[in-house]
Amino acid sequence: MPEVNISGPAGRIEARYHHQPAANSPVALILHPHPQFGGTMNNQVVYHMYYAFQKRGFSVLRFNFRGVGRSEGLFDNGPGELADAATALDWLQAYNADAPSCWIAGASFGSWIAMQLLMRRPEIEGFICVAPPANLYDFSFLAPCPSSGLMVNGAKDRVVPTESVRGLVERLKTQKDAIVDHATVPDANHFFEDQMEGLMEVIDGYLDKRLGKPKPQKGKAKKESAA
């Protein structure tokens, strides 16, 4: 079921879904960057994170926020996109009622939405935030941060400076209930152009630490197109 349409609060939500046939597979939801700056579910950071969870045995969903691609509705600067994400997670969990765990990941604007959803859904036990826009959006709602996760940014990001991400991580580290790791990818900009391999080394390393290394796949791994 690679292509799905979910009934959302603003109409149809266009999505891509990978289902694991194994019973009791965990689930992960991936959120894309800012819709008004070219962000879609086919963003390369989103796609590579989608596959990172897929190869670790997760049922994974990525989708277009309202007004993007074939998703209906109009950009809502946060509240509507959070509602879309909540609806997508509801769909993912309903389709995987026996899932033992749930993760969420987001890129840039998507990471801000992801962390808001994290605060509302206690079943989410891990997160990955790529280039979280700590200098552009208010993350003070993370008090306390309910789950452990990773925040990673590019060393040459001119949109979200490393100092702003490091400051957010340091604030979260003062809390006792969650461990927030921080990593910086050398030479990477906000979009990780030509640095995707370095980004995925960081993300894969973190997932290996939390989940264990993925089991070798029989034959050639099937990887969907991001387009």
Image (tube, helix red, strand yellow):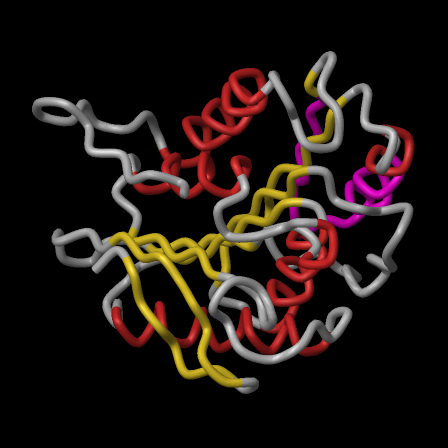
In the rendered image, which quarter is residue 186 located in? top right
- 72 over 44 or under it: above or below: below
Q: Is 66 or 17 nearer to us in this picture?
A: 66
**Where the C terminus falls, by quadrant?**
top left
Residue located 72% across and 30% down the image: 153
- Answer with left or right where residue 121 lies relative to residue 185: left
Q: Position of residue 215 (x, y in %)?
A: 21, 27
- 52 over 70 or under it: above or below: above
In the rendered image, which quarter is residue 189 located in? top right
Residue located 45% across and 32% down the image: 207
Residue located 67% across and 77% down the image: 74
**Where the N terminus falls, by quadrant?**
bottom left
In the rendered image, which quarter is residue 9 located in? bottom right
The part of the chain drawn in magenta is 167-184
Q: Which residue occupies the extreme left position in the image? A: 219
Q: Is residue 42 magenta?
A: no
- 132 over 36 or under it: above or below: above
Q: Is residue 179 magenta?
A: yes
Number of numbered discs visible in the structure rendering = 0
Q: Position of residue 154 (x, y in %)?
A: 74, 25
- 39 over 79 or under it: above or below: above
Residue located 51% across and 24% down the image: 200
Q: Position of residue 99 (x, y in %)?
A: 28, 62
Q: Position of residue 98 (x, y in %)?
A: 23, 67
